[in-house]
Amino acid sequence: MGESWLTDEISHEGRSRISDVLNSLIQNTAAENACIIVATVAEQEHAASLQGKILFWQMNDTASLPAACVLEQTSASPCLPVSFKDKTTKAFFSLAVQVVKHDDIALFVAGYFPHQKASDYDMAFLELSGERVGLIAESASLHREGSLKLLHDRLSLFDEVSEMSSTGGWDYDVQTQQIHWTNETYRLFDFARDTRVTLYRILSCFPSEARRKLIKAIQMLLASGVSYQFELPVITRKKHKRWVKLSGKARKQNGEIVKIFGSVQDITEHKRLSETEQNYIEYLNTILDSMNDAVLTVDELGTIITANQTVEILFGYEPEQVIGEDISYLLPGPPDDEQIEFVRQHLRPGLGAIFGKELSAKHRQGKTFPIEVSVSEVEQVSQSQFVCVIRDITERKQAVDSIYQIAFFDEVTHLPNIKSFEKDLRRLIIAAKTTKRQMYCCMLDIDNFAQFNLSFGKETGDYILRIFAGRIKKAVSSRFQVYSGLGDKFYILFKEPFDESKDAATMDLIDSIEWGVHSELGKEFTLHGHSQLVSTSLASTYVHAQDASYEKITGILDFGTRQAKKQGPGGRVTLERNEFNAYDRHNYISQSFAHALEYNEFYLVLQPQYDKHGRILSSEALLRWNEKRLGFISPGEFIPIAEESDAVVDIGYWVINEACRLLSEMKSQGLETTLSVNISGRHIARADFSDRLLETISEWQINPEQLVLEITETTLVTSIDLVRKRIERLSQLGFAFSIDDFGTGYSSLSYLKELPITELKIDRYFVDEINFESDDVPIVNTIIEMASAMGVRTVAEGIENEIQIQYLTRRGCDIFQGFYLSKPVEEETWRNLLLTCAKGKIARLVN
């Protein structure tokens, strides 16, 4: 505290009271390093400035305050600009209050707030405190009559303001050991105004820990004059729990401490709000620290201001280690790196936010990893700051890569799969159409691959696929892409469009690669310790852009591989542009079956089957098709196409229904006969086949024995377990079964013993070997002998001459069928043949 007096009229007691008021004022202002000054100013007429001298001041650091100042009164405003003589810059008192005017001397109380503007609360408290200082000074120095009442009134006003601000004062006289409280201090501790206050009674209001802290502070204040200021909890006399802000200072006289004094302010509400705010801050920090994303605040210069705990998880640094560093500290690359510059460009006010930008980050250990950054701008104390949310997307990128791998690559061969092939081929088609060029594509299909899976299992099948994938990749150049298709198929695509009329080198390369691939796949490989040879059928095509579509190219290649397989194992077909007509015809036929059924384009012809005496024992119902646009289509052409889809099932049901209709009509004429109809493997596989068959014969009122169901040997070989169940059930109901094209299935004959087969049809391929009377055909002989031993009749089809009939008759064949006896005939002719035979005549057509 500094004191400088122009007059001795203010007594020691007056000075003490002024000191108490100013101490309370300085302790309760919010400004740091605030200064409270009492000064005199001599009024001078027409003076540019007023010379004044500081009487009294109170501040935290009194050493820097000079004894004199110059006050420049520029207006009637209560705020006077003041400059100290030894200061080069001006400072402004926030308030100056004239409290005493005696002759030509005026007394001012002013507050100086060097770092911030005083609050409304500070201003009001300062003004009232100034008035009180003036009243005390007037009372102590002038002793005017009648002024005591005014003084009392103004002191009462001060007490009211003190109560409003919840601030009280206290002092302790070291010599007399007496404590004085202001009214507000009594109220804060819930003591009656007339209560005798002792130090022990005051200390009893504080909890033990707070009490120890306060006792220690008072002891140091009394011993060495060390001021204190802190916040402590209080339990008042009425058991109210409060928080108070306490301050204490010492006054010395002749180097000895004669008095200690201070203020008491009720900060309960402030503390509650502060604790709520602190709890909320801790709550927010807990949320931020529990996030999987790193959250940083960064200023306009790119300096990291705050960081949550996730920074350590993502980057390997503790939050304290990155605070104060530049944002580039967490990003790889030199300072002029493109992504660092991108981030800096967005750390500018009003530039706009970043949402989910993918960048790279740098871990403390040096590794880089992918991140997703979002930046938003916030306003803090009139300055822009930026909140950066950083998410590690390593797992997401890996998941995306994994999903992409699953979606576009084959898990067995690790080659791009059929979806990749479609994507790349469609892109190539667009490029080829733009330049009006051609494309090359090839498909390979492993021959009899299903047999390896059935014989050795899927693992062996996968092993073969990997062997073939490796060999194909080895045989092609970088200008080709290899794909794994469905099942056992592979595709090879030339990556660039070309002009076959001008680019001879490309054509030679493609031809060389195609032969190389075909040759490489024809080599033996080791399987379960043994050398194994697996052949592959190959179909390739050159497609002009204007003719191209993904569906057409894949369809042509499928069509081509079927053509290649007809050549035998290892077949190879290159489809020229003029061969696309065959593919178009194939497609047209496959799409016309439904129309043919709806508009009755199908019809039946019937070929009689004879015994050795020339009598008709049965007939085979054969399907024919006269298409509206293509005309007559051979069954050898359309039946294989129908078998590629369920169209063969619908056609088969139509044939069965027509056969039952013919049998029903003949029965109505008093003649019962039998008809053989072909059923496909697709029929056998359907769960409702037996029920549909029974419904049909019931509708036409015929006996099951009149219908012979012909099944190819291939169907038996591929579906023996399923076929056995179906055949056994239908055989019990009276249906007869015939094995068609017997001897061509390359299979064991054991199923003849297991299945209720009625007859075997000797394939025409073996019958054609009988050309001379002296011929001996062992396979035919074996089939007939075996069938006889098993009690199964034999039917020889494809009879072309008398020599064949005679040979088969001698060997014991039961039934004969062929053009030599009768061609397939239409319904009316067939009926007449049956009626002629019924009259005991030989019913054989003359050829």
Image (cartoon, rainbow, N blue to C red):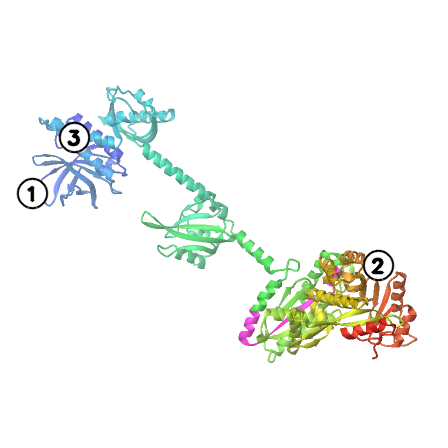
The three-letter code of the residue at mark 3 reads: Arg
Q: Could you say which quadrant of the image residue 454 lies in?
A: bottom right
Q: Quadrant of the N terminus?
A: top left
Q: Which type of secondary structure does the marked residue at label 2 adopt?
A: loop
Q: Position of residue 659 (x, y in %)?
A: 75, 67
Task: For the residues labelled 2 and 3, say whether their Cβ atoms are less than 8 Å apart.
Answer: no
Q: Position of residue 58 (x, y in %)?
A: 22, 34
Residue at the image point whose x is 84% and y is 65% from the top: 760
Q: Is residue 104 above or below residue 366?
A: above
- Along the horizontal axis of the image, is 128 left or right of 543? left
From which residue to which does the magenta span run? 427-452
- Along the horizontal axis of the image, is 7 left or right of 742? left
Q: Which residue is mark 2?
A: 750
Q: Which residue is mark 1?
A: 45
Separation (CA) of disc 2 from disc 3: 128 Å
Q: For label 3, count other residues whose C-alpha is less than 10 Å away and answer few (under 14), some (14-19) or many (20+).
A: some
Q: Which residue is mark 3?
A: 154
Residue 363 visible in the current orientation: yes
